[in-house]
Amino acid sequence: MGAPELVNESFSSRQFSDCIAHELANPLNGMLVSVEVIERYCETNPRAVDEITDLLRILRNEIKRLVLLLDELRYSRVLAGINLQRTSLSSEIKELLASQSSFYEQRGIRVNQEIPLGLPFIMADKSKLRQIILNLCKNAVDAMPNGGTLTLRSYSSEEWVCLDIADTGGGIPEDMPVFEPAVTTKPQSSGLGLTIVREMITQLKGTVSYTSHPGNGTTFHLKLPIRDGKSLERPARIAPATVAR
């Protein structure tokens, strides 16, 4: 794609709740019907268990999708209040990547950090900030099923601290409204991850946008407001890249 698509508008709590109710209602109804069919079938064919494998597979897939949806809601706390505090973006990134290092190694992902340690502080809710970065990193890793490079690059610009999260995957299809609820290319996904990211970054008074080129990866761009223009005590330098072996 060409110029970054700026997305910084929110939707109401009621709209979000309606979306969740819709997402839960359809698969739950389908699961209920499937259970009733299985019960009736087993009553008349107690020995024909192998023939209900497809119905069980459908149930299992729908349950997994609901679990993913509930996990996203549980950990995002997207509708909760925010607790803004003086925050070091570089420290939060360092701790988050350390906690995910084993996962990245298993997936064959090389992590490249270009994070100056002397960035200005930002005002942020640390829990929401971590969830935003974690969601975007997870999406990047999912876009590289055969391994690749995940790059986190940060810099300051006037009143903002900026963070780019890039992958070397296949890119996002052109004109795909990725920030809209239930929009996804992954079969086992609620399609709410980027919607939640948009909601949380808006609560933090920041913006999120992306650039993507089919076959050449995607980069998400975050902008977060600087607290007071004061830098960290340590001099700025580039954190070394880490490689999953």
Image (cartoon, grey):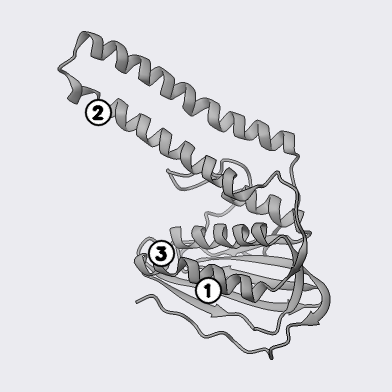
Q: Say if mark 2 contacts mark 1, CB within 8 Å.
A: no
**Amino acid bearing label 1:** Thr
Q: Quadrant of the C terminus?
A: bottom left
> x and y percent of residue 52 in the render?
24, 23
Q: CA distance from mark 2 to mark 1?
A: 42 Å
Outermost residue toward the right in this view:
228
Q: In the figure, is residue 101 to the left or right of 224?
A: left
Q: In front: mark 2 or mark 3?
A: 3
Note whether 39 is above or below 126 in the view shown. Answer: above
**Amino acid bearing label 2:** Thr
Residue at 28 percent of width and 28 percent of height: 54
Q: CA distance from mark 1 to mark 3?
A: 15 Å
- Circle number at residue 32: none
- Circle number at residue 103: 3
Q: Is residue 59 visible?
A: yes
Label 1: which secondary element: strand
Q: Nearer the viewer, residue 72 or 163?
A: 72
Q: Nearer the viewer, residue 218 or 51?
A: 51
Q: Say if mark 2 contacts mark 3, CB within 8 Å.
A: no
Q: Residues within 10 Å of mark 2 (few under 14, many from 20)?
A: few
Q: In the figure, is residue 231 to the left or right of 173?
A: right
Q: In the figure, is residue 67 to the left or right of 116?
A: left
> x and y percent of residue 101 in the render?
44, 70
Residue matched to label 2: 53
Note whether 139 is above or below 52 in the view shown. Answer: below
**Amino acid bearing label 3:** Phe
Q: CA distance from mark 2 to mark 3?
A: 32 Å
- Circle number at residue 151: 1
